[in-house]
Image (cartoon, helix red, strand yellow):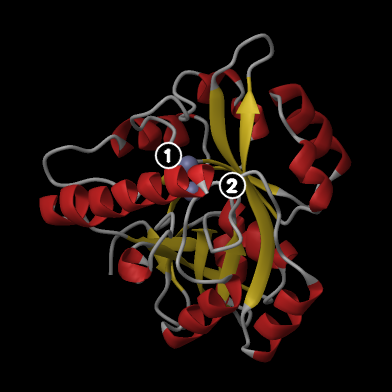
Amino acid sequence: MNKGRTYNKCGFSFSKSPFSVFLCYISVMKLKANLHFHSKEDPCDIISYSLFEGIDKAKELGFNVLASTCHTKNIVTAEHKTYAEKNEILLIPGIESNVYEKGTNRKNHVLILNCDESANDIHTFDDLAAYKKEHAEIFIIAAHPYFYGSFSLAERLEKHIDLFDAVELSWFYTRWFNKNPRGAHIAQKYNKPFIATSDTHFFKFMNTNFITVESIEKTPKAFFKAIKNGGFQNTTSPRSLYDIFITFAFWEVKNIIKKIWIKIM
Ligand SMILES: [Zn+2]
Ligand SMILES: [Zn+2]
């Protein structure tokens, strides 16, 4: 065992915060979680499986928690929730929102979890701040903040750091190029959780990039509280160049072609 760490009865390690010591004496459950998941209902990306099929896959892979985060729309219905419950999955409604800095046309991807349909109307950082004020139960993640593309937060992460509950550790990296260290630095600087996700658009990386959370209950409130207190472990590893440039690029090209086809038809 590592010096300076404490372990509960499940062998799960924590730094010695009062919360972690408390966890050693109570019954906790390990929850395998995917907090960034797209499905066929996504209005922006072309995806081959529905959220129902995604729930089936999550169950097959042993996940306990799944957050639906389609672009610009919370697509979770009562039927999805019932279906997830039957499959012993805690389904968290969410959205990958395009948040704009006032007066600019540069969008920033932001994950808003445990939200309702009114989160669909969030378009600016002011909207996000107002929504957060009204909805203390939500959990906001800075998605792939320093990655390529005009949709990443970059310097706007620090500017609006108080809005964020966590920073994403993106699956999109290899041993040779990796934009995650800058996100890790900001997460550490502001004492925010740094969370591994698979930004699932296809199932291939779903079981190699996720978090395991030690929570006293399988409820959104207890789950997010545990993450905020550092009671989680990341599972992540660098992808191969093949995965990045063939698997992902092939999916992206297919996505673009299908979008053009839909526009023409
Ligand atoms: Zn994104
Ligand atoms: Zn995404």
* Residue situated in front as seen by the camera: 234 or 246: 246
Camera sees residue 63:
no
Could you tell me which residue is drawn at 46 percent across and 46 percent down? 259
- Residue furthest bottom as drawn: 86
Q: Mark number for residue 144?
A: 1
Disc 1 residue: CB within 8 Å of ligand 1: yes
* Residue situated in front as seen by the camera: 36 or 180: 36
Q: Position of residue 202 (x, y in %)?
A: 38, 64
- Badge 1 marks a residue whose secondary structure is loop
* Residue situated in front as seen by the camera: 237 or 227: 237
Categorize mark 2 by other alpha carbons within 10 Å: few (<14), some (14-19), many (20+): many
- Badge 2 marks a residue whose secondary structure is loop
Left or right of 113 in this view: 134: right
Q: Which residue is mark 2?
A: 71
- Residue furthest top as drawn: 103
Q: Is residue 16 above or below residue 106?
A: below
Q: Amino acid at mark 2?
A: His
- Residue furthest right as drawn: 134
Real-space CA distance between mark 1 and mark 2, rounded to the nearest whole angstrom: 14 Å
Could you tell me which residue is drawn at 49 percent across and 78 percent down? 58
Badge 1 vs badge 2, beta-carbon distance below 8 Å = no
Left or right of 190 in this view: 221: right
Categorize mark 1 by other alpha carbons within 10 Å: few (<14), some (14-19), many (20+): many
Disc 2 residue: CB within 8 Å of ligand 2: yes
Left or right of 139 in this view: 31: left
- Locate residue 108: give its quadrant: top right
* Residue situated in front as seen by the camera: 216 or 252: 252
Q: Position of residue 157 (x, y in %)?
A: 52, 26
Q: Position of residue 189 (x, y in %)?
A: 45, 29
Q: Amino acid at mark 1?
A: His
